[in-house]
Image (spheres, rainbow, N blue to C red):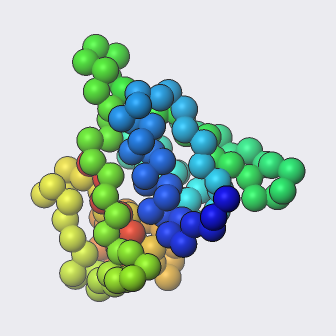
Amino acid sequence: MSAVTDSIGDYLTRVRNAIMARHRVVEIPASNLKKHITEILYQKGYIHRYKFEETPNGQGVIKIALKYDPYTRESAITKLTRYSRPGLRQYKGADELPRVMNGLGVAIVSTSKGVMTDKEARSLNVGGEVLCFVY
């Protein structure tokens, strides 16, 4: 198995692929950054629930139960896009943070005060690396 250079990109791709395949649960290798992103997705109502499990190798996995509309079977996540990449990091100041779909979506930002949404970062007046967009 090859090493993944962009673990956040891998995380987003696994979630996107699971949604396209209509899976109920997706398993992702855990890291603290991925745990914070998962918690934000849960707080904002994009996923049904999540669970952090330990593995024998000590890394652990994140199990995410995806959320679908009970009638239309549409996913709660319509788009999941990587913004800042390892080859081109995107850092923005508090006043430059992008608005996703005029405030309907969420930009996840890694700041000096932790991982948070663009709205939280604006209210705390902190900038940081814009990791991804969700809507």
Q: Residue furthest right?
A: 56
* Residue nearest the observer in this picture, 116 or 33: 33
- What is the quadrant of the N terminus in the image? bottom right
Q: Residue furthest front?
A: 1
Residue at position x 49%, y 58% in the image:
10
Residue at position x 15%, y 55% in the image:
101
What x and y, as percent, mark residue 12? Answer: 43, 54
Q: Quadrant of residue 25?
A: top right
* Residue nearest the observer in this picture, 125 or 104: 104
Residue at position x 24%, y 52% in the image:
105
Q: How many marks?
A: 0
Q: Quadrant of residue 133?
A: bottom left
**127 versus 36 height, above or below:** below
Residue at position x 22%, y 82% in the image:
95
**96 versus 80 height, above or below:** below
Q: Residue furthest left?
A: 102
What x and y, as percent, mark residue 78? Answer: 26, 41
* Residue nearest the observer in this picture, 33 or 25: 25
What x and y, as percent, mark residue 47? Answer: 44, 38
**104 versus 21 height, above or below:** below
What x and y, as percent, mark residue 131? Answer: 39, 69
Q: Is residue 103 visible?
A: yes
Left/right placement of residue 30 relative to residue 133 reads right
Left/right placement of residue 110 relative to residue 91 reads right
Q: Is residue 124 visible?
A: no
Left/right placement of residue 58 relative to residue 90 reads right
Q: Quadrant of residue 73?
A: top left
